[in-house]
Amino acid sequence: MDQLFNNFKSSLQTFLNDTLYRVVVAILFLLVFFLLYTLISKGLKKVLYRKKKPTLLVKFIATALKCGAVFFGILIAADILGIPNASIIALLSTAALAIGLTLQGVASNLMSGVIMLNGSLFKEGDYIALSGVEGSVLSITITHVEIVTSSGLRVTIPNSKVTSDIVTNYTVLGKRRIAMDVSVSYDSDMGRVAEVLRAMIERHPNVMKEEEQLVRIKEHGDSAVIFVVRCWTPTDQYWSTYYDFKEQILSDFKENGIEIPYPHIVTVPAKQD
């Protein structure tokens, strides 16, 4: 009995002197480690926000930093406790490989999201064309982009598709060119037609007068002369100006006696035998 008691006492003494000491040191290390991480994370966020980096990018960097801190914190704490790091690394590597193979599509979207956040393809509110869809960017997440079309449809596009497809950004330059064809009869006074179209452009308040304007004959059609009208307008006023022109052309041409050709049907009575 005395031998058993002495063995228990010896084991307890060893635990208190070694294992418990290691546990206390590991806990203290984790407390200090994560306190330092919190201070560094907050400081990094302030710097990134001061440099006007996208909010989503800042959150992604903060999350990645947190994951890295947790990983290295656990490794160091395990080493203090005497647990071999090789075993932990092998376990985590196997788990990461299994998850990666299962979620290949998600991983692809995540990486594409990182590329997008660090670039300048577009931002929320921009009007873009992508994958056959046109609309305003509603939100940009780490895995996908949401677009609202002019018809009120909400379209979700994976980030991997965004980075591999052609993106047209209509907003980024702050201006957009109106280009429309106008048909007139061959009997019209072409000089007068050009004057009327130029006057329409000049008096519209949304037209950017400092930018290039063009009114020229573009084509000799089968039944009409085709004029091309080009001018620039602020992006957010493009469609209102475009439709104003469509309405104004009808009004101005009617006022100036300029004919807009349209198909005619000629009925020829059948000959009587």
Image (cartoon, helix red, strand yellow):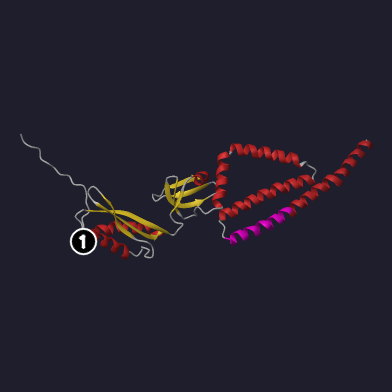
Mark 1 Cα-neighbour bin, 10 Å: few <14, some 14–19, many ≥20: few
Amino acid beneath label 1: Asn
Image position of 124 (left or right of 179): right
Residue 162 point in image, percent of width and height: 50, 46
* Residue marked by disc 1: 256
Magenta span of residues:
33-51
Per the picture, the main secondary structure of the magenta-coloured stretch is helix
Q: Please give left or right for residue 79 compared with residue 190 in the image.
A: right
Q: Residue 21: give x, y in percent of width and height.
A: 83, 48
Look at the picture and state if 21 lies above or below 196. Answer: above
Give the position of the N terminus as an image quadrant.
top right
Residue at the farthest left position: 273
Secondary structure beneath dot 1 equals loop
Which image quadrant: the C terminus?
top left
Q: Position of residue 159 (x, y in %)?
A: 52, 46
* Residue 184 inside the magenta-drawn segment: no
Q: Residue at x 59, y 55 (%)?
A: 58
